[in-house]
Image: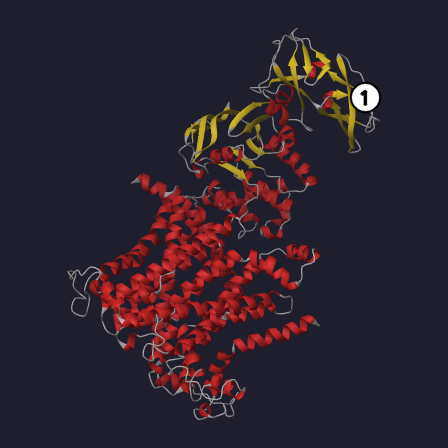
Amino acid sequence: MLQIEIDNLNKHYGGFHALKNIDIAIRNGSFVALVGPSGCGKSTLLRTLAGLEKTSSGDIRIAGTSVIAKPPRERDVAMVFQSYALYPHMDVEHNMNYSMRLKRRPRPEIAARTRAAAETLGLGGLLDRLPKALSGGQRQRVAMGRAIVRNPKVFLFDEPLSNLDAALRVHMRSEIRKLHERLEATSVYVTHDQVEAMTMADHIVVMRLGVVEQQGSPLDLYDKPANKFVAGFIGSPAMNFIPVVVGPDGQSLVIEQDLAQPLVLNRKLNPGSRLWAGLRPEHLSFAPVKGDLALNADVESVESTGSMTFVTAGVASQQLVVAHSGRPGVERGAVIRLHISLENIHLFDRETELAVSG
Amino acid sequence: MKRTILLIIGLTITAIYLFPLYWMYLTAFKASTEIFQYPPSFWPSDPQWNFLEVWKARDMGRYIWNSLLIAVGVTTLVTLLGTGCAYVLARVRNIWMDMALFAILMMQVLPSSLMVTPIFVAFNQLGLLASPRFAVILAQTAKMLPLYIVLCRATFVQLPRELEDAALVDGSSRIGAFFNIMLPLAKNGILVTSVLIFLQSFGEYVYARSLIAKNELQTASVGLQSFMGPNANDWNGIMIYAAIYVTPILVIFMLLQRRIVSGLTAGALK
Amino acid sequence: MQGIIRTIRDGSGFDILLLLLALVYLVAFSAFPIIYNIIMSLQTVDMFTIASFDRPFVGLKNYYDILSQPLASTIFWNTVKFVVLSIVFQLSIGFGLALFFQQDFPGATWLRGLFLAGWIMPALVVGAIWKWLLAGDFGVINYILMSSGVTDERIFWLSDPDVALYAVIIANVWLGIPFNMLLLSVGLAGIPRDVYEAAELDGAGAFERFRSITLPLMRAQLGAVISLGVIFTLQQFDLIAALTQGGPANSSNVAQYWSWQLSFQTYEISLGSAVSVMMILFVIVVAAVYVRSTHHEHSY
């Protein structure tokens, strides 16, 4: 069953076209991440879902009912804000049950639900504290509590972890995920961090400049990026791109300015077409793998995090980043053989930037 | 060491600046013969307490009451009319709001002494001068409203927009979010600005002088002016009057000094 | 109807309602009087026609009458002197004090706050106090000046036509110092400390730092303070009413006081209107310049 349907949604700010023909369908109970660089419209889309922004055309349905003309309070959505937006003049308890008090729920119910939400989030002892007396992590939990206490149709998250330090962020990531599995509520999660999107969501929508570039499951986006932008955005470190030209046989790729080392693929391509070859750093290795081909490369720099080593290797005038788990034992200035597994090469048209199959 | 020298210089400069205030209080406590001594004394040789006599003789209770009435009226009206406008101007940003804000800034600078001519004639034709204190309230409100809006807007600008969004998502109407979330959070700024408006209106002179004809409806500022007359020499009495008039203002100001200063600077520069 | 209630509850109708509340009031009691003022300045308005709605139209005659009076040039120059001298001294003293209280010493902020006592007081009371300070026979200022040897004879500050205007200016400077100091302090506090430290490392002395960092970075601020100074100085009425009432023989009369005198003491209301229209126009131009300058400040 579909919980949220966004049909051909458009939004203009004056002359600026902020959202362009957005079509998204979200299954009941799924966790959707809206991801993209800043200014891509992901937050605007979330705010239009909440009813905080007006739309120019198109429709939004929540649980089958059109909400496009409804104010936020009639949409039954809860939102966790980036700044948490806790009411500074209310203690934790009143922050959490404000929505129920507005709906004039019976007192015992308000008390019971507030307590239950506080238990869930480990806020039991903090109910009478004001937001200013809480740590960043605690504030984040209160913001979450304010959302779950209402049991809404949809949860909206606007970069809720971006104000936390790295360790706490990783911890809260899994907590939110666990909470979602327990509540099974439909969630829409905005983030600019693709790692967060990949690890948390079961459906990812990648946006750029107000347009949905691609949507699908995290591994779909990783394995079959629809265009160069998505390919470069999903995955860390980012995919390497090298300009290539298809040889006369329709099978070999010639790296520009490096005619000596053609890559021969088992695909049918248009001879002479100009493409980007996309190679993920983790698909490059220093040792031979099955079905690979190898290039000569100069090691330009070696950066190690201890568990992982990132090597920048020069092939002709191009630079390729190689991700190697462990220590590869290569040094700066060395000449090495770089092995590429053929089935993992992504190809994109250089004009349209769309994926090319063949 | 350097800081001590700076402190001493600072104290000296402040003392020089505040000397007129000291002189007012000093004269108020001197005997009426001592004020005409030459050379003047800088400390009363025989301190007097003539405050009650002056209060009664000049009928100050009535003047102060009229001033209070006008100041309370202006402050109430300004707060009721201006708070919402300040909030909207802080919240919505578009070309219309910029124009409205510009118009309000322009109206903030209109001098009372120049506006009083058309206001007097118009109020006279409308029959408003029959209730002159009310007329002064209306005129002074128009003078103070832009200032209030500009200062209050600065308070609302500092409130995060997301708080209101959160309230709306939580199920609040616009009206509810304004009264339950934004107003309580802007309370301090509104209070300080209202005090400022109150103090300014409590000392108002031009409109009271021009629109109020009857002496028994006059304000303390006009009362002081008539006390000073062309050939006044009861400086002892005049300074007592002045001291009674400004002491409450100075006390309120000192209590709220820090907040007034920060409110003013935020409003003037944003 | 339903729709209107809904937009007020949940939509932009709420914003419009709140905005209109104040704007309608301001249009009625600020904008309309200005327009009415312009109309009156083109009519004959005196004691006989004041209550009538049908007054004779005389075109620009009032403006001609007012500008052709010999008094007009006296008052014009008085006003220029009043504004320029007030601002020069308010600004330089205020800037000096702002720089001084910027230093790090105990109680600096608190002492600076005390200065604002001068600003919060009713100008009429300030006028009364200065009238007593400046009194010719028993005024303490004359005593201080004579005993310190600055002058040998008493200065009759308020009754000598040659000095009356300067007496008013002195009192007005006293009133204006706090506001200038406060605004400039804010500007100074906004200059990051590390800019000065960088300049010091580059070898700039205290004077050089002031000239090459403080002044240029304070330019927008100084512009704003000067425009506000012009506006506030042209609002000054109470002080003149308390000190000299424009006298003796108009030697300390300025435009905003003259306009009031014409309307309320000699009942030449249309002449008062004409002066008022010209001055309001000038104030609005200055204010527009000020608002533009603060807008520029935003962008940088």
Is the residue C153 above or below the residue B109 in the image? below
Residue ranking furthest to the right = A329
The residue nearer to you, when weighing A20 against C156, is C156
**Subunit of label 1:** A
Residue A284 lies left or right of residue C160; in this view the side is: right
Across and down, in percent, residue C34 comes to: 29, 59
In this picture, residue A190 sits left or right of residue B133: right
Compared to residue C212, the image places residue B120 above or below, namely: below
Please state, as top left, top right, bottom left or bottom right, where the N terminus of chain C lies in the image. top left
Image-quadrant location for residue C188: bottom right
Q: Position of residue A175 (x, y in %)?
A: 65, 36
Q: Is residue B220 visible?
A: no
Q: Residue at x 54, y 51 (%)?
A: A88
Q: Residue furthest top?
A: A249
Local packing at callout 1 (Cα closer than 10 Å; few below 14, some 14-19, many 20+) is: some
Q: Nearer the viewer, residue A272 or A33?
A: A272
Give the amino acid at mark 1.
Ile
- Coloring scheme of the render? secondary structure
Disc 1 element:
strand
Q: Is residue A310 visible?
A: yes
Q: Quadrant of residue A37?
A: top right
The image shows residue A336 at horizontal and vertical percentages of 81, 21
Indicate whether B92 appears above or below C232.
above
> Above or below — where is A67 with respect to B266?
above
Instruction: Please name the residue that numbered disc 1 is placed on.
Output: A336
